Image (tube, rainbow, N blue to C red):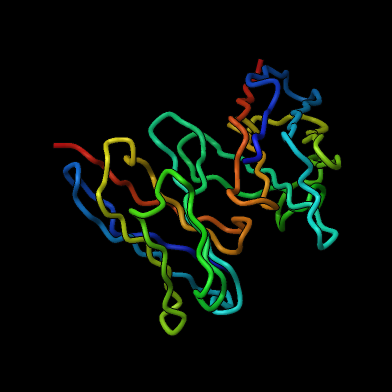
Amino acid sequence: DVVMTQSPLSLPVSLGQPASISCRSSQSVAASDGNTYLNWFQQRPGQSPRRLIYKVSNRDSGVPDRFSGSGSGTDFTLKISRVEAEDVGVYYCMQGTHWPLSFGQGARLEIK
Amino acid sequence: EVQVVESGGGLVPPGGSLRLSCEVSGFTFSADWMTWVRQAPGKGLEWVANTNPDGSEKYYADSVKGRFTISRDNAKNSLYLQLNSLRVEDAAVYYCGTGGQMDVWGQGTTVTVSS
Protein backbone atom coordinates (compact mmCIF):
# COMPACT_ATOMS: atom_id res chain seq x y z
CA ASP A 1 0.00 0.00 0.00
CA VAL A 2 1.15 3.57 -0.68
CA VAL A 3 1.71 5.60 2.48
CA MET A 4 1.33 9.38 2.17
CA THR A 5 3.33 11.42 4.68
CA GLN A 6 2.67 15.13 5.14
CA SER A 7 4.81 17.71 6.87
CA PRO A 8 4.55 19.79 8.86
CA LEU A 9 1.36 18.61 10.57
CA SER A 10 0.85 21.99 12.20
CA LEU A 11 1.43 25.24 10.37
CA PRO A 12 1.06 28.56 12.20
CA VAL A 13 1.27 31.34 9.61
CA SER A 14 0.80 35.11 9.80
CA LEU A 15 -1.76 36.73 7.53
CA GLY A 16 -0.24 37.71 4.19
CA GLN A 17 2.70 35.34 4.60
CA PRO A 18 3.38 32.30 2.40
CA ALA A 19 2.77 28.72 3.51
CA SER A 20 4.03 25.41 2.20
CA ILE A 21 2.97 21.82 2.92
CA SER A 22 4.97 18.80 1.80
CA CYS A 23 3.52 15.42 0.85
CA ARG A 24 5.72 12.38 0.23
CA SER A 25 4.56 9.02 -1.05
CA SER A 26 6.20 5.71 -0.17
CA GLN A 27 6.39 4.86 -3.89
CA SER A 28 5.96 6.79 -7.10
CA VAL A 29 2.39 7.84 -7.87
CA ALA A 30 3.08 8.38 -11.55
CA ALA A 31 0.56 6.26 -13.46
CA SER A 32 1.15 4.17 -16.56
CA ASP A 33 -1.19 6.47 -18.51
CA GLY A 34 1.26 9.34 -18.07
CA ASN A 35 -0.75 11.13 -15.39
CA THR A 36 0.14 11.56 -11.72
CA TYR A 37 -3.01 11.34 -9.62
CA LEU A 38 -1.96 13.50 -6.69
CA ASN A 39 -4.70 15.69 -5.25
CA TRP A 40 -4.93 18.30 -2.52
CA PHE A 41 -8.01 18.90 -0.38
CA GLN A 42 -8.95 21.64 2.07
CA GLN A 43 -11.28 21.08 5.02
CA ARG A 44 -12.36 24.26 6.76
CA PRO A 45 -13.64 23.95 10.35
CA GLY A 46 -17.08 22.35 10.42
CA GLN A 47 -17.21 21.84 6.65
CA SER A 48 -16.86 18.99 4.19
CA PRO A 49 -13.54 18.73 2.41
CA ARG A 50 -13.22 20.25 -1.05
CA ARG A 51 -10.65 19.53 -3.69
CA LEU A 52 -8.22 22.36 -4.48
CA ILE A 53 -5.70 20.73 -6.82
CA TYR A 54 -5.83 17.65 -9.04
CA LYS A 55 -3.11 15.85 -10.98
CA VAL A 56 -0.35 17.64 -9.03
CA SER A 57 -0.82 21.20 -10.26
CA ASN A 58 -4.28 21.80 -11.73
CA ARG A 59 -6.49 24.14 -9.73
CA ASP A 60 -10.16 23.25 -9.42
CA SER A 61 -12.77 25.76 -10.54
CA GLY A 62 -13.17 28.63 -8.08
CA VAL A 63 -9.89 28.00 -6.27
CA PRO A 64 -7.92 31.23 -5.79
CA ASP A 65 -4.66 31.45 -7.72
CA ARG A 66 -2.71 31.96 -4.49
CA PHE A 67 -2.91 28.14 -4.22
CA SER A 68 -0.45 26.16 -6.31
CA GLY A 69 0.71 22.57 -6.46
CA SER A 70 3.96 21.11 -7.72
CA GLY A 71 6.09 18.01 -7.63
CA SER A 72 6.61 14.66 -9.27
CA GLY A 73 7.23 11.01 -8.49
CA THR A 74 7.16 10.82 -4.70
CA ASP A 75 7.57 14.44 -3.66
CA PHE A 76 4.81 17.05 -3.79
CA THR A 77 4.13 20.50 -2.39
CA LEU A 78 1.10 22.70 -1.85
CA LYS A 79 1.92 26.40 -1.62
CA ILE A 80 -0.20 29.33 -0.56
CA SER A 81 1.42 32.55 -1.72
CA ARG A 82 -0.28 34.84 0.82
CA VAL A 83 -2.35 33.30 3.57
CA GLU A 84 -5.79 34.74 4.21
CA ALA A 85 -8.09 34.16 7.19
CA GLU A 86 -10.38 31.90 5.12
CA ASP A 87 -7.47 29.48 4.53
CA VAL A 88 -7.62 28.19 8.10
CA GLY A 89 -8.30 24.47 8.16
CA VAL A 90 -6.77 21.08 7.49
CA TYR A 91 -5.09 20.20 4.20
CA TYR A 92 -4.83 16.65 2.91
CA CYS A 93 -2.95 15.15 0.01
CA MET A 94 -4.33 12.02 -1.63
CA GLN A 95 -2.91 9.63 -4.19
CA GLY A 96 -5.40 8.21 -6.67
CA THR A 97 -2.99 6.12 -8.73
CA HIS A 98 -2.67 2.88 -6.78
CA TRP A 99 -5.30 0.77 -5.01
CA PRO A 100 -6.03 1.27 -2.18
CA LEU A 101 -6.29 5.03 -2.59
CA SER A 102 -4.69 6.81 0.34
CA PHE A 103 -4.64 10.16 2.12
CA GLY A 104 -1.96 11.94 4.09
CA GLN A 105 -2.54 12.54 7.83
CA GLY A 106 -3.59 16.15 7.29
CA ALA A 107 -1.77 19.41 7.98
CA ARG A 108 -3.52 21.98 10.16
CA LEU A 109 -3.03 25.61 9.13
CA GLU A 110 -3.76 28.27 11.71
CA ILE A 111 -3.24 32.00 11.84
CA LYS A 112 -0.38 33.07 14.08
CA GLU B 1 -23.52 23.17 -10.73
CA VAL B 2 -22.79 19.69 -9.40
CA GLN B 3 -24.67 18.81 -6.24
CA VAL B 4 -24.06 15.75 -4.09
CA VAL B 5 -26.44 14.79 -1.29
CA GLU B 6 -25.86 11.85 1.05
CA SER B 7 -28.50 10.30 3.28
CA GLY B 8 -29.20 7.18 5.28
CA GLY B 9 -26.91 7.60 8.28
CA GLY B 10 -28.05 6.88 11.80
CA LEU B 11 -27.48 5.02 15.05
CA VAL B 12 -27.01 1.27 14.75
CA PRO B 13 -25.79 -1.37 17.26
CA PRO B 14 -22.58 -3.31 16.65
CA GLY B 15 -23.27 -6.08 14.15
CA GLY B 16 -26.09 -4.10 12.56
CA SER B 17 -26.61 -2.88 9.01
CA LEU B 18 -27.28 0.41 7.24
CA ARG B 19 -27.66 1.55 3.65
CA LEU B 20 -26.28 4.91 2.65
CA SER B 21 -27.48 6.75 -0.45
CA CYS B 22 -25.94 9.51 -2.51
CA GLU B 23 -27.91 11.46 -5.09
CA VAL B 24 -26.06 13.54 -7.66
CA SER B 25 -27.31 16.30 -9.98
CA GLY B 26 -25.73 18.63 -12.52
CA PHE B 27 -23.32 15.91 -13.59
CA THR B 28 -23.26 13.11 -16.14
CA PHE B 29 -23.45 10.45 -13.44
CA SER B 30 -23.40 7.45 -15.75
CA ALA B 31 -20.12 8.53 -17.34
CA ASP B 32 -17.86 8.68 -14.31
CA TRP B 33 -16.45 6.79 -11.37
CA MET B 34 -17.89 7.42 -7.92
CA THR B 35 -16.22 7.25 -4.51
CA TRP B 36 -17.00 6.86 -0.80
CA VAL B 37 -14.65 8.34 1.82
CA ARG B 38 -15.17 8.42 5.59
CA GLN B 39 -13.90 10.47 8.52
CA ALA B 40 -14.05 9.16 12.07
CA PRO B 41 -14.67 11.77 14.79
CA GLY B 42 -11.61 14.01 15.14
CA LYS B 43 -9.63 11.95 12.64
CA GLY B 44 -8.41 12.24 9.08
CA LEU B 45 -9.88 11.05 5.81
CA GLU B 46 -10.05 7.37 4.85
CA TRP B 47 -10.91 6.08 1.40
CA VAL B 48 -13.64 3.40 1.57
CA ALA B 49 -14.70 2.30 -1.92
CA ASN B 50 -14.90 3.18 -5.62
CA THR B 51 -16.96 1.96 -8.52
CA ASN B 52 -16.58 2.48 -12.26
CA PRO B 53 -19.25 4.08 -14.50
CA ASP B 54 -21.28 0.93 -15.19
CA GLY B 55 -20.75 -0.59 -11.75
CA SER B 56 -18.85 -3.62 -13.06
CA GLU B 57 -15.66 -2.75 -11.16
CA LYS B 58 -15.60 -2.22 -7.41
CA TYR B 59 -12.67 -1.55 -5.12
CA TYR B 60 -12.65 -1.57 -1.34
CA ALA B 61 -10.38 -0.66 1.55
CA ASP B 62 -9.20 -3.76 3.42
CA SER B 63 -10.91 -2.45 6.56
CA VAL B 64 -14.36 -2.82 4.95
CA LYS B 65 -13.86 -5.60 2.40
CA GLY B 66 -16.45 -8.36 2.78
CA ARG B 67 -18.70 -6.19 4.95
CA PHE B 68 -19.51 -3.16 2.78
CA THR B 69 -20.90 -3.16 -0.76
CA ILE B 70 -20.84 -0.22 -3.17
CA SER B 71 -23.45 -0.06 -5.92
CA ARG B 72 -25.06 2.45 -8.24
CA ASP B 73 -28.25 3.07 -10.17
CA ASN B 74 -27.42 5.21 -13.19
CA ALA B 75 -31.09 5.68 -14.05
CA LYS B 76 -31.55 7.37 -10.67
CA ASN B 77 -28.19 9.21 -10.59
CA SER B 78 -27.60 7.48 -7.29
CA LEU B 79 -24.75 5.76 -5.49
CA TYR B 80 -25.18 3.43 -2.53
CA LEU B 81 -23.10 1.89 0.23
CA GLN B 82 -24.48 -1.13 2.07
CA LEU B 83 -22.83 -1.42 5.49
CA ASN B 84 -23.12 -4.84 7.17
CA SER B 85 -21.57 -6.31 10.32
CA LEU B 86 -20.89 -2.80 11.59
CA ARG B 87 -18.19 -2.28 14.19
CA VAL B 88 -17.62 0.55 16.65
CA GLU B 89 -14.65 1.64 14.53
CA ASP B 90 -16.91 2.16 11.49
CA ALA B 91 -18.51 5.18 13.19
CA ALA B 92 -17.76 8.17 10.97
CA VAL B 93 -19.10 10.79 8.62
CA TYR B 94 -19.42 9.11 5.23
CA TYR B 95 -18.86 11.30 2.19
CA CYS B 96 -19.79 10.56 -1.39
CA GLY B 97 -17.72 12.13 -4.14
CA THR B 98 -17.87 12.41 -7.90
CA GLY B 99 -15.15 10.88 -10.02
CA GLY B 100 -12.39 8.60 -8.90
CA GLN B 101 -10.54 11.51 -7.31
CA MET B 102 -13.31 13.05 -5.21
CA ASP B 103 -13.89 16.00 -7.54
CA VAL B 104 -17.00 17.26 -5.71
CA TRP B 105 -18.01 16.20 -2.18
CA GLY B 106 -21.34 16.06 -0.45
CA GLN B 107 -22.06 17.28 3.07
CA GLY B 108 -21.73 13.77 4.47
CA THR B 109 -24.00 11.49 6.47
CA THR B 110 -23.15 10.38 10.02
CA VAL B 111 -23.02 6.74 11.06
CA THR B 112 -22.93 6.02 14.80
CA VAL B 113 -22.27 2.46 15.98
CA SER B 114 -23.13 1.95 19.60
CA SER B 115 -25.13 -0.34 21.82
Q: Position of residue A25 (x, y in %)?
A: 73, 35
Left of A28 or right of it: where is B64?
Answer: left
Task: Tell me which residue sits at (72%, 55%) in the image.
Answer: A60
Task: Tell me which residue sits at (28%, 53%) in the image.
Answer: B9
Residue B11 vs A19, above or below: the answer is below
Q: Quadrant of the N terminus of chain B?
A: bottom right
Q: Nearer the viewer, residue B109 or A13?
A: B109
Q: Nearer the viewer, residue B58 or A63?
A: B58
Q: Nearer the viewer, residue B38 or B5?
A: B38
Q: Residue furthest left?
A: B115
Q: Position of residue B97 (x, y in %)?
A: 53, 58
Left of A22 or right of it: where is B35?
Answer: left
Q: Position of residue B50 (x, y in %)?
A: 52, 60
Task: Tell me which residue sits at (58%, 68%) in the image.
Answer: B33
Left of B39 or right of it: where is B26?
Answer: right
Task: Using the rendered view, name the quadrant where residue A35 is placed.
Answer: bottom right
